[in-house]
Amino acid sequence: MSGPAEAAERLARNAVDVLPEGALTEQLALGRPLRVKFGIDPTAPDIHLGHTVVLNKLREFQDAGHTVVLIIGDFTARVGDPSGRSAQRPVLEPEQIDANAKTFQEQAFRVLDEGRTEVRFNSEWLRMDAEDVFGLLAKTTVARLLERDDFSRRMKARAPISALELLYPLLQGYDSVAVSADIELGGTDQKFNLLFARDMQTAYGEQPQSVLTMPILPGIDGVQRMSKSLGNYVGVTDPPEEMFGRVMRVPDDVMPQYYVEYAEVSDSLLQRAKSMDKLTQEHPDAKAPVEEWLRGHGRSATDTKWVPLSARRATLTMLLDAHTGETLDALPINPW
């Protein structure tokens, strides 16, 4: 059985940020199931492949014996998350939010283990009276809220920021307090909100959560993030032929990002992997780009292996961690 450090390394596979450093290992060493929080505002009725990057990571935590706390932001959806936005989000009708929430749950359980998922609606605790709201506002400063990139960019552009949007990080942060979250997952665009929740937990006398952010999957246009509103998505409930057709539109140079995010860590894959020396010996033209990649990522030829990969019309070299089998990258080098 692997120890806390090895378990943390495996659970952190493909994550962009795992913060604070070493916290996940310390939490796993406690020897109890951790409460792993993920919040979603039901602003759309369906989920797409981009959502499943985080959902798959949550499932990994479940398979390791931990509990996922899925928070449906039926209350925060009325405020609107400003993350990644250059303008205020439109406010949805309550009936639409409720319908979206129902659909999201049904689709999320295509990935998550329903028996290991605790579903909560943040309207349970966010319908506060004025005194509680004042107490919440007293836990931070406007200066701290304006540190987030979205707000600073809009201020420079003299674009409006509503007081309601300033309230959003406090509400999301209080979610972590309400459910006693040990860990929170989200996309890289959520980094400020996830770290801000640590401040809120500390202010309320709780142990602050650790934070794990996952990459944001590009849409099938290969340019912008996957989004239903942009039409560049693959829906999880789409018919198979439609999924296939949409994925076939992904540009070849973006395919490695899809493969790395969805490739399984498996012993069989690692067993088939070859040494980096063998790659450069068999393919001398690969020597320079491989050495450049190793230098740029602080790795050596001894802790990295490779396997050949076919991705549609492209032939690629997939790089793995020699010890864990973690997929690291896919280089445009023909290994055949």
Image (tube, rainbow, N blue to C red):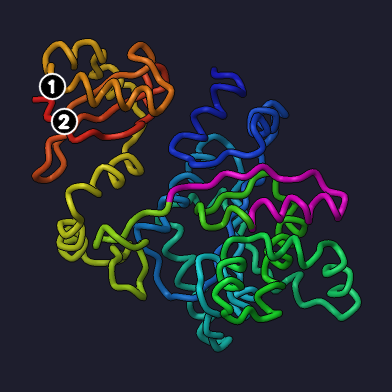
Q: Residue at x 71, y 60 (%)?
A: 173
In the rendered structure, find residue 40 and report the number of the disc placed on it. none
**Magenta-colored span:** 193-215
Q: Are marks 2 and 1 in contact (CB under 8 Å)?
A: yes
**Which residue is denoted by mark 1 in the rendering?**
285
Q: Is residue 193 above or below residue 1?
A: below
Q: Is residue 138 above or below residue 25?
A: below
Most distant residue in the right direction: 131
Secondary structure beneath dot 2 equals loop
**Which residue is denoted by mark 2 in the rendering?**
333
Q: Residue at x 61, y 68 (%)?
A: 151
**Type of residue at label 1?**
Asp
Q: Residue at x 55, y 19 (%)?
A: 2
Asked where in the image residue 289 lies, by quadrant, the reply is top left
Residue neighbourhood size for the residue with mark 1, other residues' Cα within 10 Å, grouped as few (<14), some (14–19), many (≥20): few
Q: Residue at x 71, y 64 (%)?
A: 145
Secondary structure beneath dot 1 equals helix
* Image quarter (top left, top right, bottom left or bottom right) of the N terminus: top right
> Residue 62, how many percent across, how many down?
53, 42
- In the rendered picture of this protein, how many numbered marks are placed on residues? 2
Task: Name the side, left or right, on which 225 lies relative to 9.
Answer: left
Q: Is residue 55 above or below residue 71?
A: above
Q: Is residue 298 magenta?
A: no
Q: Is residue 211 magenta?
A: yes
**Type of residue at label 2?**
Ile
